[in-house]
Amino acid sequence: MAYTMREVAKRAGVSPATVSRVLNRTKDISPETEKRVLDTVKRLNYYKNVHARRLSTGKSDLFGLIISEIVNPYFPELIRGFQTAAWDRGYDLLLCNTEYNLSRAHSVVRRLIENDVRGVAVMTASLGKDLTAELVAAGIGVVFCNLGPTETLVSNITIDYQRGISEAIEHASSLGHKRAAVIAGPEANRTAVTIKQSLVAGLKAHSFKLSAMTESNYRIDAGAGAVRAILAQPQVPSVIFCGSDLIAIGAMSALEEAGISVPGDISVIGIDDISFAFLARPPLTTISVPRERLGAIAFEALEKMLKLKRRKGVDFYLETELIIRKSTAPPGRGR
């Protein structure tokens, strides 16, 4: 037998509104009342009718999250942070990944609008305001990373890559490195461009000689290919700065194949601090981006913006920091 919320309320000795508040976690309820309602829900095997709720309130319980690709280890912690924040407030998540495909990205935006989501976190730097303008036009709030400035229904999270990059360059300089190479992320990715520009400017400010500057997609094999191109140059660097940990892991693999020791001959520094960074051999020195916190902030940005009367966008800030492990050391004498 399928029970209604009204029947649950009657059995628990509370109002239907109280049952709704307990299940949706929209207001603080006394522990005793909450336990009584949840025990009744469990005993009756009651499930919320989300379609009925949507009809009665005119709103869905969904928030959208757009990422680049589900297999990239950068994203699981971000997804967990966003999902946990949403669930803690009684909302659900509609997760979409673009696979770096523009046609698929258009379909993702259309799907989110059709599902009447309350807000969307765009956590891929491959999409800009031009594509997601449809969401804003539909009255759906959006939060980006490092896009700014904020607008009505558009919030921004600034990830301070500059701080971690400065720490990484100072670390390499303190070890005695003078010649560096950079393997940046793809040119079409605005975050990759920001990181590349910060690296090049920082290395120049610390009087490094840039022996090579190349680009790669965010895959291990691409990082390996980029290193082979760097090793073919007349002057080999003593330290390589990579635009992501996946690139760095690929770089270390190619260096090992070439008989080059990391960090004995060449040091390697990544960005992101994915779980594989610690498991790499040697463990990777990298710039940590607290991605679970990023996911939580993304939801917080959407929720805060939607509570504001004028739906004005909000600015948020996230710091990065260098995590020193064993892929960096003073430059080898032979190089």
Image (spheres, rainbow, N blue to C red):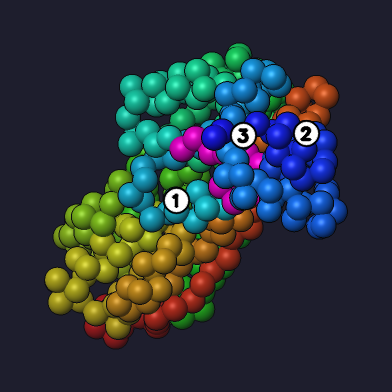
Which mark sits nearer the N-terminus, 2 or 1? Answer: 2
Q: In the rendered view, would you say 280 is above or below 320?
A: below
Q: Is residue 76 magenta?
A: no
Q: In the rendered view, would you say 63 is above or below 39?
A: above
Q: Which mark is residue 75?
A: 1
Instruction: Give the Cα separation between the discs numbered 2 and 1.
Output: 38 Å
Q: Secondary structure at mark 2?
A: helix
Place residue 235 in its image quadrant.
bottom left
Which mark sits nearer the N-terminus, 1 or 3? Answer: 3
Residue for badge 2: 16
**Residue range corresponding to the magenta coloring:** 83-95
Q: What residue type is disc 3 on?
A: Tyr
Q: In the rendered view, would you say 219 is above or below 239?
A: above
Residue at (29, 48) in percent of width and height: 216
Residue at (44, 50) in percent of width and height: 75
Q: Is residue 31 visible?
A: yes
Residue for badge 3: 3
